[in-house]
């Protein structure tokens, strides 16, 4: 027999899934608590038992989505200690995450903090938690001294977030190939000379 806590968690998971799907497909502002209650098989009062407002429910959806992508990110990059390989893997993981058919990822991508002024601080903090993962990787990269690492992080994340508009999971490129290509561009343009030479030698050895 399931405990009350397990039953409560199951109902909460169902509620979050329903909210994520509606926020992703019809928009946060166009979705009502009544819509979410109907989709999750609950009464509106039951939704309010779990969350005091629609904004609080959005925060829970956001938090769940961020936790999912951070977990995938950390598991993926732990496979190697090489800084450029870690970045390549991180990029491919990001592309795969934001282009998969996940309502949680679509909410994070499409509902920006500035769209919900009352929750601007909380939503920004959640997004920053994930962006900090990329910041740590970029801090470890062997790049030329003139490189502004903060701008590099913004450039990389901006380019990656835009992949949701052009990447086709059924197309010719895989997320791993996108990661390798993006990283290759960076190595060629901003890596220290020694790093670039080693990367070039590695590519030549594969070609021979």
Image: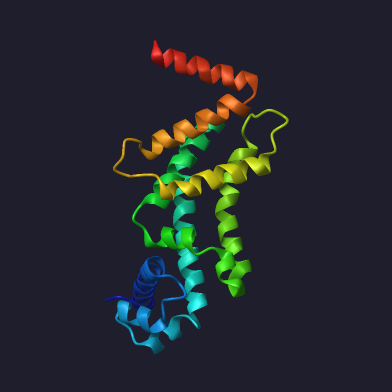
Q: Residue at x 51, y 36 (%)?
A: 86
Q: Residue furthest front?
A: 166
Colour basis: rainbow
Q: Quadrant of the N terminus?
A: bottom left
Give the side of residue 192 with respect to residue 57, left or right. right
Q: Nearer the viewer, residue 143 or 178?
A: 178
Residue 100 against residue 8 in the figure, above or below:
above
Q: Residue at x 43, y 40 (%)?
A: 92
Residue 128 location, x and y as percent?
A: 60, 56
Q: Residue at x 31, y 77 (%)?
A: 39
Q: Residue furthest top?
A: 208
Q: Is residue 65 among the parts visible in the rendering?
A: yes
Q: Residue furthest bottom?
A: 45
Q: Residue at x 56, y 71 (%)?
A: 116
Q: Residue furthest right?
A: 146
Q: Nearer the viewer, residue 144 or 115?
A: 115
Residue 189 against residue 90 in the figure, above or below:
above
Q: Quadrant of the C terminus?
A: top left
Q: Nearer the viewer, residue 30 or 67?
A: 30
Residue 163 against residue 24 in the figure, above or below:
above
Residue 2 against residue 69 in the figure, above or below:
below
Q: How many marks?
A: 0
Residue 115 location, x and y as percent?
A: 55, 68
Q: Is residue 78 among the parts visible in the rendering?
A: no
């Amino acid at each position: 027999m399931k405990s009350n806590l397990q039953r409560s968690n199951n109902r909460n998971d169902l509620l979050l899934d329903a909210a994520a799907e509606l926020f992703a497909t019809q928009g946060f502002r166009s979705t009502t608590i009544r819509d979410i209650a109907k989709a999750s098989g609950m009464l509106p009062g039951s939704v309010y038992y779990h969350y005091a407002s629609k904004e609080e429910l959005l925060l829970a959806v956001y938090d769940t989505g961020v936790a999912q992508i951070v977990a995938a990110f950390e598991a993926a990059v732990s496979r190697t200690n090489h800084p450029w390989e870690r970045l390549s893997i991180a990029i491919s993981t990001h592309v795969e995450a934001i282009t998969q058919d996940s309502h949680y990822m679509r909410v994070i991508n499409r509902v920006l903090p500035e769209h919900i002024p009352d929750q601007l601080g909380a939503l920004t903090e959640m997004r920053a938690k994930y962006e900090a993962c990329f910041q740590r990787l970029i801090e470890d990269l062997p790049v030329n001294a003139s490189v502004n690492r903060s701008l590099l992080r913004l450039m990389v994340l901006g380019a990656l977030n835009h992949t949701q508009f052009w990447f086709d999971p059924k197309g010719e490129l895989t997320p791993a190939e996108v990661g390798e290509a993006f990283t290759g561009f960076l190595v060629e343009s901003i890596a220290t000379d020694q790093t670039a030479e080693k990367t070039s030698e590695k590519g030549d050895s594969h070609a021979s």
